[in-house]
Amino acid sequence: MKEVFLIKHAVGGRAFVDTGKHPIPYTWEHVGDQWVFTVQIEKKEDIAELLKWKEELNVFLFQEFENKPTKKLWFYVGDDSVHYSEEQGELTIVAKSQIVYIPDQFSAQL
């Protein structure tokens, strides 16, 4: 399975992180009733712009399989859920809800 991790400003907004285009280290785990994402971002100029919009971020994971359709996971980031450690160059995002969908299962018929 190939996985692409994205951090976007709002749903249709610009992408601050897109590991499909610019790979960076990240991890994620389901802890209790939330999901915790940890991302290594060392450039201060990259993180400064992202943090301006920290109350309006969405996190996506696109899981691409060899013989199955791509599964998309959309995570909602709440208030005070985005933190950056300058010392470690590490961004932490906590999401409290998600939607999982497979685009191939939806179609528009005109």
Image: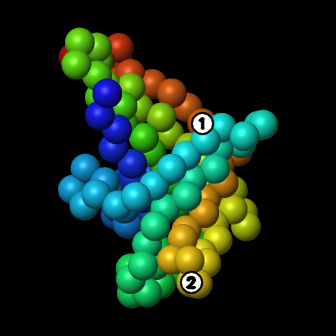
Q: Is residue 56 above or below residue 72?
A: below
**Residue 67 numbered mark, or none:** none
Q: Residue at x 61, y 41 (%)?
A: 29
Place of residue 98 in the rendered image (x, y in percent of width and height, measured from the top left): 60, 36
Residue type at mark 1? Answer: Gln
Q: Is residue 108 visible?
A: no
The answer to which image quadrant residue 61 occupies is top left
Please tell me how crowded label 1 is: few (under 14), some (14-19), or many (20+) other residues with Cα within 10 Å.
some
Q: What amino acid is at disc 2?
A: Glu
Q: Quadrant of residue 79?
A: bottom right
Q: What residue would you read off at disc 1? A: 98
Distance of mark 1 from mark 2, alpha carbons?
28 Å
Q: Quadrant of residue 80?
A: bottom right
Q: Which residue is mark 2?
A: 86
23 and 104: which is toward the camera? 23
Report the residue at 69% width, 62% height from top: 81
In the image, taking residue 25 as reference, residue 110 lies left or right, namely left
What percent of the width, then of the height, locates residue 18? 32, 56
Sequence-earlier tag: 1 or 2: 2
Q: Secondary structure at mark 1?
A: strand
The C terminus is located in which quarter? top left
Q: Residue furthest right?
A: 32
Classify 10 Å Cα crowding around label 2: few (below 14), some (14-19), many (20 and above): few
Q: Is residue 25 left or right of residue 75?
A: left
Q: Is residue 86 above or below residue 5?
A: below
Element type where label 2 sits in the image? loop
Asked if the residue at tag 2 contacts the one at tag 1, i.e. Cβ–Cβ closer than 8 Å, the answer is: no
**Residue 91 in view (yes/no):** yes
Side of 51 where 16 appears, left or right: left
